[in-house]
Amino acid sequence: MLQAVALQDPVQDDQANFNAVVNALAGQGWCVIPDFMPPEQWQPLAAEAKQLYAAGEFRLARVGHGDAAKVRPDVRTDRVRWIDPLEATPLQQAYLERMEALRLFINGELSTGLFDFEGHFALYPKGCFYRRHLDRFADAKHRAVSCIQYLNEDWKPEDGGNLRIYLPDGKGKETYTDIQPIGGSAVIFLSDQFHHMVMPSKRERLSLTGWFCKRR
């Protein structure tokens, strides 16, 4: 098993982080960025998400797309709360604006034609998981780049809940690397290239998960 390797030392400069994302997408297709979001940004988002969850605003996540989507507890057991740009709180709006800046930067450097962004909070209660999957649907291929922003305080290896991302080994087979959902870190990858899964979590696990999309 490979170990997760960050592209760079933790920095809080958006330019350095954005450059790292572009270099990764143009190269290996994925990256882990430590401290992609500083504590003064992600910790309030985590607190807000927990308040929304306590208020009953999260729903069981569904599998599939559009009218065909349905709850599949054999596949995934997390809860989600979509972010509506028209009803976003100030904290959510700041997050959306940052992702918009990243979208524009990726388009400017790679001419990828990313058009929009969609995202939600994802909360995994203790014991929850998401089986191996690909983020791009067979009947809806608009998702192009996946972005996972972790919102977990003091995450430890024994807490489980790793993101397992499957990678080609260059010999016609595949291997994988496990990534801890450490608060502030982000995982960004090409949506149609990498199967991945969320291992069972031994404590509540929280993230902001989103996708840069092309025109449908």
Image: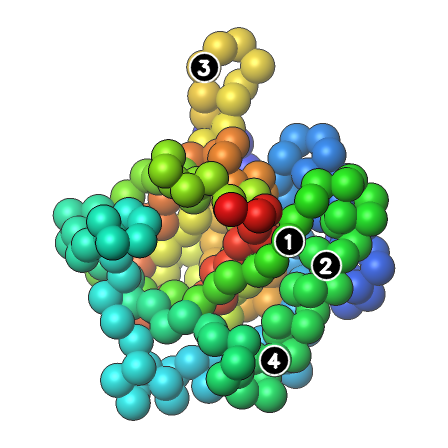
Is residue 73 or residue 13 the one in the foreground? 73
Mark nearer the viewer, 4 or 3: 4
Residue 152 position, x and y percent, is: 47, 70
C-alpha span from label 1 to label 2: 12 Å
Going from the N terminus, do you reach mark 1 or mark 2 first? 2
C-alpha span from label 4 to label 1: 18 Å
Going from the N terminus, do you reach mark 1 or mark 3 first? 1
Placement of 5 over or under 11, stated as above or below: above
Q: Quadrant of residue 91?
A: bottom right
Give the labeled residue for mark 1.
115
Give the labeled residue for mark 3.
173
Placement of 129 over or under 123, stated as above or below: above
Give the labeled residue for mark 2.
102
Q: Quadrant of residue 122?
A: bottom left
- The type of residue carrying mark 3 is Lys
- The type of residue carrying mark 4 is Gln
